[in-house]
Structures are given as C-alpha cells and as structure tokens.
Amino acid sequence: MTPCLTITNLSATLPGGARVLRDVSLDVNPGEVRALVGESGAGKSMIGKAILGVLPSSVRQVSGEIFLDGQDLGALSASKRRILVGANVALIPQDPLTALNPSRRIGSQMTDQLIKILGWNSAKAYTRIRQLLDEVQIRDRERVLRSYPHELSGGMRQRVLIATAFAAEPKLIVADEPTTALDVTVQKQILRLIATMQRQHATAILFVTHDLGVVAKISQQVTVLYGGMIIEQAGVSDLFADPQHAYTRALLRATPRYNDPDARVEPVQPDVLAGLQNELAANDHAWEKHLG
Amino acid sequence: MQRILIRLFTMLITLFGVAVVVFIVIRIAPGDPIAMMLPPGATDEDVARLRALYGLDKSLLEQFFVWFGGIIQGDFGTSISLRQDVLGLVLNRLPATLELSLFALLIALSIGGPLAIWGARERGTSIEAGIDIANGAALSIPDFLWGLVLILTFGVLIPVFGISGRVSPRLDLPFVSQFYLFESFFRLRFDLTKDLLSHMFMPALALALPLAAIISQLLKQSLKEVMDLDYVVLARVKGFSETQVILREALKNAALPTLTLIGVQFTFLIGGTVIIERLFSYEGIGNMAIDAVINRDLPLIQGIVLVFALLFVLVNLAVDMTYTLLNPRLRNA
C-alpha cells in the first residue's frame, strides 16, 4: 500500500540558517490519523504548512521531499502543485474566528473551491455542502449558508470549516490544533466530530496538537517533536504503554489525566531538557558537516 | 432612518458653519469690491451710492442675515463683477468641474488599484521596490507641477492632447446640459466625446497622479497585511492562485481603510481643480473662483465656497455609505 503522504529528510531554515525542521521523515497511510505532538516551536505546524505549500515567506525548505500518493511535490511546477495539493489535501485551521472571510457569506466560502477550482456546477456543490452541514450536525443549515461569519459562534464556525475541509473528499487533512482556540466545553464535541467524520470518510489526518490527551482519543500513530527534530514515532498504544525517549516520558508525566485528577503533574525536568539540547547540538554539528 | 436624519442634520450644521466663516473671512481680507468697479475719478458719493446698492453699507450682522435669508429661499445674490445671478453662474460651471474631478478619480483608481495589487503580489521583490519609488515620485510632485510637466511634454513637445479649454472652439455643440462628456456619450456623438476627453485628459491626469500614488501605497500596505491572515492562507490551501486570492479574499477587506482616505483625498482633489483649471484654461468653477477672488466679487466667492463645501460633505456621505456596503458587520449596527 502506498502511503498517502511520505515526507523524507525535510529540513527548513529561518533567515540566518537556524533550522525549524531537522531531517523530518514520516508516513501517513490512507485512512490513518497521525498526531504530531510537541511544545510551541517544536515545528509541528511547520510540517503541515510545508505540505500545504504555505510556509511563511521567511522560512525556506532546504532539503527533503514530500510525496503525495507517491507523487513528488518538489518535481511539480508551482501552479500544478497548487492545484494538486488543493484537490487532495485540506486544512482544518486553528482559529475558526479568523479563518473565515468576514465580508463573504458562509455558503460562498464553503463552495468556492468546488466550483472555481474543481469545476463543479453550483447546484451540485450546494447539494454536497448541505449534506456535509448535516453531517457536522448544523441544524438550521439554510440560515448558516446565508450568514456572514460574525453571525455564528466559534463552535459553529469550526463545524463549518470542518465540513468545508471534507467537501472535496481530500485524501489527507491537516488539522492544525483545531480545538485549541475553542471553549473547553466545545473542544470535546469538535474533537468527537472530527473523529466521527474521519471514520465515515476514511480520510487520513495529520493531527497537530500539543495535548497528549487529544492524541490518545483520535490517533493511531504519534510523532513526538522537539526543536524541529523527531524524538520518537510509534503507534499510539505503544507510545503510551512504553515510551522510549526520556522526553516522551516527561511529556506523559506533564499531562493532566481527567480520569485521575489527583495524579501528580510534573513539569519537564531540567536534566531531560539538557539531554534534548545535547541532541540538538549534535544534530546541528552533523548538519554543518553535511553542508560542508 | 434615524441615522440618516442625524446625518442630514450634521450636514446642515457643517454648511452653516462654512457660510459663517467664509462670510467673515472675505470681509476681513483686504480689498474693496466697490473700489475695483469704479473708474479712478469716482467721487465719494458714487462710492457710497454703489455701496448702498449692494447692501455693503449695512452692519456685518445685517448683511449676513440678508445673504443667508436669501440662500434659504434659493437666492444666492448677484455677482458684482459679472452682474448675474450667482446660483445660475455656479450651476452653469459646476458640471465641468464635476466631470473633471470624477474623471481624475477614475484615472487615479485605475492607476493606483492595479499597481497596489501588482505590488502586493510581488511583495518583497524589486518590482515592489520600483512601485514604491514611483509612488514616492508621484506624491512629492504637487498637481500643478504635474500640470506644467504634462503641458510641456504632451502639449508642446509631442502635441497629442488639447492644452487649453474644455472643447475645441470650432466644434458645434448640440448640448442642452452642461454635462458635455455625459451628454456626448448618450447622444452617441463619440467624435465630441473624443475631443472632450482629449482636453480633459491632461488636467485630470495632473490631478490624479498624487491621488493614484496614495491609493497604490495605502492599498498595497493593507493588502500585504491581509495576505497573511488565516482566511487568505485557507484560500491558498484550497488551490487559489495568488492573484485570485488577492481579488477574491483580500481586496474587499483591504479596501476599507483605503476608501476612507480616498474620501479625504478626493476633496483635496476637488480643491486642486482651482489651480489646475486655471492652468489649462478649463471653464470650470475653480477657474471662476480665481476670477471672483481677483475681482473681490464677494457674493460669487461665497456662493462658490458653499458649493465646494456641499461637495465635500456629499463625498464624505458617499464614503460612509460605501463603507457600510463593503462591511457586512456595519449593516445592522
């Protein structure tokens, strides 16, 4: 089985040469959810942006390949890549309050890709969108379609964005911390909704999060990142049962458990951080050698 | 509805304020209209008689109420130098200035808008730097200097455009209104449209260039700010090209701050017509304003200033209305 996404030795730098991604390699199989876990600045969102081709202008991909269904994205022209990625990869953004255009109606924003990029006719696109609004459990869908974003709550907007992400039946969805900006009460509903939609549509998801509790609920595979470097990759049950790296163990100890509220939550210990710094330094050294 | 009424009320107060200020200022300013009208040998009695004839012997307060009472009844007084009804004179000239200003605005938008979009698409490159330099040059040269430059290049060195007047004098004009350009268009007299545009092009361009630079600079800046927002990134992810993203997602939201500025700047542009019309001997209200000031024609100056004030107020109203149209969040507010 060809993985739906393969990344090999992906490195990206900031101006000045500091690396935000260090030789990242990972696979996502069709229909599988892989979680990318790490602290802020670990590079987990960067990986998503690199796949989608929307890296910030200051960040440059300096090595590595990204394959979508076996197709090397780096071998394509910019416009071919844009169309291919647009049709096969979707994004569920982090903040539903800023991810919708304030001056356009929801219906137009949900259908524009289907009509303008994929060439569907308007009736077919709206039928599809109505069906998806039902799936994300939006009851008064006709009102929502006519609304402007400011007329909907944050949870509603995230449902709209989830429905939009599934609309073109993408092979892969990058979910970039899709619950972080929401109220705690809504977070759980949205997470459950994404999991249900993922199963129904058998869509592969690269799920970016800093919350190991979320990882356990939704994903089959986990990649732990620190400082742009992959620390550990494993199946979710293996990782929770038998974490190999000291940092992974420290992360697990630092995660509050809702079923055991009295359990101690420990910050990541200084010796673990020192070990990580050594690994980063060694990695930098190897990189400089590689550059010659 | 209530908002519109409040709006109209504040407009009237503004206009009243302008009326008071202009009335006082031109009477404080040196120069006596009566002295300008009479031959050097006139006696004191002649002066006094003429003063009484124009009501200038009364107190300032009395003069103001006579004038203002007349305005309310639609009587703006009689021009001292031209011996004609002020309202008629102003209305006769106003269409020429309106056509010139609107044409200039159109030119400014069609130069500034595409430049801004191009610059935003090529942000961070030498193309954007080039656009910045061009904007800086256009902005630092005032409109009347642009006028002179244009007259020299396209009127004298390579004479392609008319440099004087509104229309070639040899042409027969079938028009019933003073909106020559509009009327020639609707009468399908495109030969006249062409002649009118040829005369209007250079003064309009001179007025438009600084405004075009401002539009280009500000719109480009707003576009660049919008281009990194989440919904623009999402549109790129969907597969839209950079140009599509700018036109579909960014432009409408980025246009709001630019629009406010265009409103303010357009009033400056209308103010600029005074000198530009003089420069190109264009028979608009601005050209008439300069004659009125030279002749100390108090009623005519007052009338012209009031009309300019009314234009400014209306432009601001139009900007507000467009703002509401572009921003759905303001509609129910």
Image (tube, helix red, strand yellow):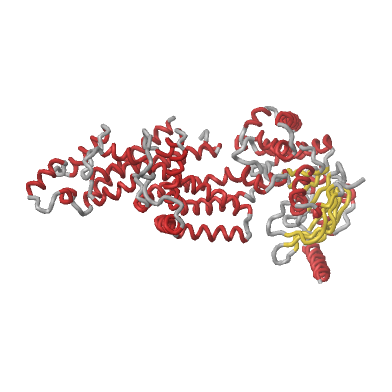
Residue B329, position as x, y percentages in the image? 55, 37
The image quarter in which residue B19 lies: top left
Residue A111, position as x, y percentages in the image? 70, 35
The answer to whether residue A129 is left or right of residue B147 is: right
Residue A107 versus residue B31 in the image, above or below: above
At x 79%, y 52%, the residue is: A76
Residue B99, position as x, y percentages in the image? 41, 42
Outermost residue, right side: A1
At x 56%, y 52%, the residue is: B115
Outermost residue, front side: B170
Asked if one can make out residue A78 in the rendered structure from this viewpoint, the answer is yes
Asked if one can make out residue A174 in the rendered structure from this viewpoint, the answer is no
The answer to whether residue B83 is left or right of residue A17 is: left
Residue A140, position as x, y percentages in the image? 67, 27
The answer to which of A249 and A89 lies nearer the viewer is A89
In the rendered image, the quadrant that contains the C terminus of chain A is bottom right
At x 47%, y 53%, the residue is: B209
The answer to which of A180 and A252 lies nearer the viewer is A180
At x 35%, y 43%, the residue is: B309
In the rendered image, the quadrant that contains the N terminus of chain A is top right
The answer to whether residue B91 is left or right of residue B318 is: left
The image quarter in which residue A7 lies: bottom right
The answer to whether residue B314 is left or right of residue B289 is: right
- Number of on-image labels: 0
